Image (tube, rainbow, N blue to C red):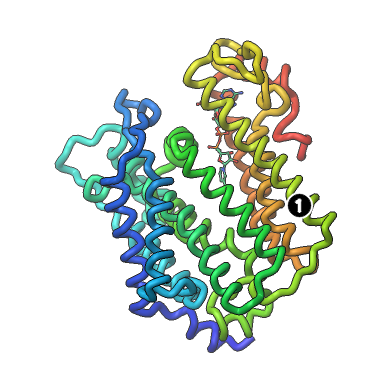
Amino acid sequence: MDLGVLLQALIPSWNSVLVLVIFFAYLAVAGSILPGKLVPGVTLQDGSRLHYRCNGLLALLLLVGLLGVGSKMNFVSPTVISDRGLELFSTTFIFSFLVSCCQFPDRSCSKGSSLEPHITGNLIHDWWYGIQLNPQFMGIDLKFFFVRAGMMGWLLINLSILAKSVQDGSLSQSMILYQLFCAIYILDYFVHEEYMTSTWDIIAERLGFMLVFGDLVWIPFTFSIQACNNDLEKKYQQVALGWWLLNQKVELTMAAAIANCFVFLIGYLVFRGANKQKHIFKQNPKALIWGKPPKVIGGKLLASGYWGIARHSNYLGDLLLALSFSLPCGISSPIPYFYPIYLFILLVWRERRDEARCAEKYKDIWAEYRRLVPWRIFPYLY
Ligand code: NDP
């Protein structure tokens, strides 16, 4: 691979800066003015609660619609992202770096749990993990904003790759499956955006480089690798970040395609079902689970439905989904399996962290839950 070509493709251009600025500006305006359910976040340590306007689905559909009309009228190229993949990648990376360097808590106003600065004095630590729980910019909750931008960015990258493959005449069954699965996953995410308000990242993680980079760079640019080509040199010359299925001919048998759909479906049912059951249970501990009164431990933990089969069964659903996004690429290379492999490591680590947290928080109740439901993630992974 020619390193010079790669480095050249990585240099941010004013065009890539413009694309990013327009995207963020759209999200800021759309997020503030479009109608959406106002969802209260969890109660913070000081008793306060943030409220999140969950209008991500409308904002996304409107954006895709505007881009569609714009490309029909030749205002915008549908392949603008796939043509400038690496430039956009480096521009977003630099933006994430700069944003996390600009953490200047306002010492004059009253803070509360959301804005109270947690400064350890270790610059690297504070930059990496962040200082504030829920920093805001011009009234916009940055954590919610960035995760939304990352998920939408992933879909926009995929759609641009799809447009490129249609343009090249290289649209394949594998590309259609990959695009379909990811689009359903991302749209479903926005349909259920309010569930996001009670996830670990939103309620517990401070906003530092780790989270900004994870949301803005990691999610959109690495989750779309499946669509990548491993012919890196050709790829860098041709389409910057260059996407797998764009240049790779993968012939899936009908049986393989059906099996792939099956993995996606099971993954989706477990992922969505488990997260929904927990969400409903937290709102109303008496709500029926799979048509029956729930089995509840200590009045706080759900031990029926998916949560009665395995602890953190929602992680299994996510893992199956991630696998289903990669299977369309066949098994000739490990590169398209980057996302499921990374997710496996992440979720096994998360499960251990959450297990320790819950054992500490719920004490005997958690011990009872572990006794009743011994499986972790399922099937038992380690
Ligand atoms: P969870 O949504 O699984 O939340 C864990 C919390 O749920 C625990 O801390 C506890 O919180 C509560 N809980 C655990 N067990 C029970 C129970 N039996 N009954 C009632 N409450 C329980 O964790 P995450 O926020 O990590 O994940 C949310 C989703 O996001 C998952 O589906 C995950 O797969 C996905 N995800 C995807 C990633 C990706 O890169 N694709 C990355 C990270 C997550 P409490 O103290 O409130 O009771």
What x and y, as percent, mark residue 54? 38, 39
Residue 82 or residue 205, whichever sits in front: 82
What x and y, as percent, mark residue 263? 74, 46
242 lies above or below 125: below
Can residue 204 be seen here? The reply is: no
Q: Quadrant location of the C terminus? A: top right
What x and y, as percent, mark residue 296? 61, 13
Residue 187 or residue 345, whichever sits in front: 187
Q: Quadrant of ligand 1?
A: top right
Q: Quadrant of residue 272?
A: top right
The answer to whether 76 appears left or right of 190 in the picture is left
Q: Quadrant location of the N terminus? A: bottom right
Label 1: few (<14), some (14–19) or many (≥20) C-alpha neighbours in 10 Å: many
71 lies above or below 177: below
What x and y, as percent, mark residue 275? 58, 32
Q: Quadrant of residue 194?
A: top left
Which residue is at 32% across, 28% downward? 49
Q: Which amino acid, mark 1?
A: Asn
Q: Secondary structure beneath disc 1?
A: helix
Report which residue position mark 1 lands on.
Answer: 260
Which residue is at 62% across, 14% downward? 294
The answer to whether 121 appears left or right of 286 in the picture is left
Count of numbered tags: 1
Which residue is at 44% across, 49% downward? 147
170 lies above or below 206: below
Residue 82 or residue 332, whichever sits in front: 82
The answer to whether 77 appears left or right of 105 in the picture is right
Residue reaching furthest to the left: 108
Q: Quadrant of residue 229?
A: bottom right
The answer to whether 361 appears left or right of 328 in the picture is left
379 lies above or below 170: above
